[in-house]
Amino acid sequence: MSQRHLLIGRGLLAVVLFSAVSAAWSMAAAHGNSEPRPTPGAKVTFRRIFPGSSPEFIEVTVQNDSNAATYEIRQLDEDAGAQQFEVGEALRSKIFELTRQLNEFQGQDLDVHRKIANLGEKTFRWQQGNVSHETKFNYTLNSAATQLLQIFEGLARQQEHYALLERRIRYDRLGINDALLQFESDLNRGLIPEPKRLLPLLDQITADPKFVDIARQRARTLGERLRRTASAPG
């Protein structure tokens, strides 16, 4: 083969390679990365019904495109009524990532199907528009489901602490320290997903001289701890 033909062949090969790479770039730009993107307007709901426990009914709903969430915590014979609260973006992303791992609960049988104690009927439900999937279980060994359960039960526990502190601030100043001790215990065990949500109440207790000094000091210490944690890198 002559040098002229060799150069022409190399030129054609370069054109073909460039076209292939350009096509790959175009496809990547059109489809983005390989990570699944969240469906706008999707909701995940956790419900636990456990007659004879306290509380007997828990329901928490989180949206993937909004901090706005709702919770309902009560006994079964009490009036129904959800209340609003907020869930941060990082925690919402974790919730929906675990939900994707569970195929948005479609066709998921999470229960161990063994004779164990009744721990309450738990339901995970995914909804987007008119489409929804749900699964129910008493106890599961599925890792993703267990993580999701811990997050939702933690959010419910967090709101219980918030509601208790609010009530004590209004109606039972002498009971504030006991409520703070309960919160601190769960905080130490890592059971509260977003403890910084309670900072406004802790600051209110710290600043109010009507509360006993031991409660004000505990609230101040807890507030400083949460701020240090929130500002820590990583």
Image: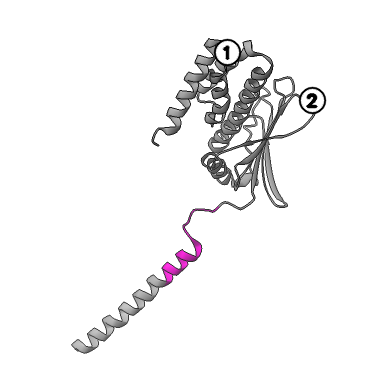
> Which image quadrant: the N terminus?
bottom left
209 or 62, which is in the foreground? 209
Instruction: In this rendered view, identify the residue nearer to me: 52 or 1.
Output: 52
* Observer able to see residue 47: no
- Is there any visible trace of residue 7 in the rendered image? yes
* Looking at the image, residue 107 lies above or below residue 217: below
Of marks 2 and 1, which one's residue comes earlier in the chain? 2
Left or right of 199? Residue 105 is right
Residue visible at 27% across and 86% down in the picture: 8
Range drawn in magenta: 23-37
Picture coordinates of residue 57, whole percent (x, y): 72, 28
Q: Is mark 2 on a helix, strand or loop?
A: loop
Question: Looking at the picture, how far across and down is residue 148, in whole percent?
Answer: 57, 36
Residue of label 1: 177
Vertical placement of residue 37 versus 56, above or below: below
Q: Quadrant of residue 215?
A: top right
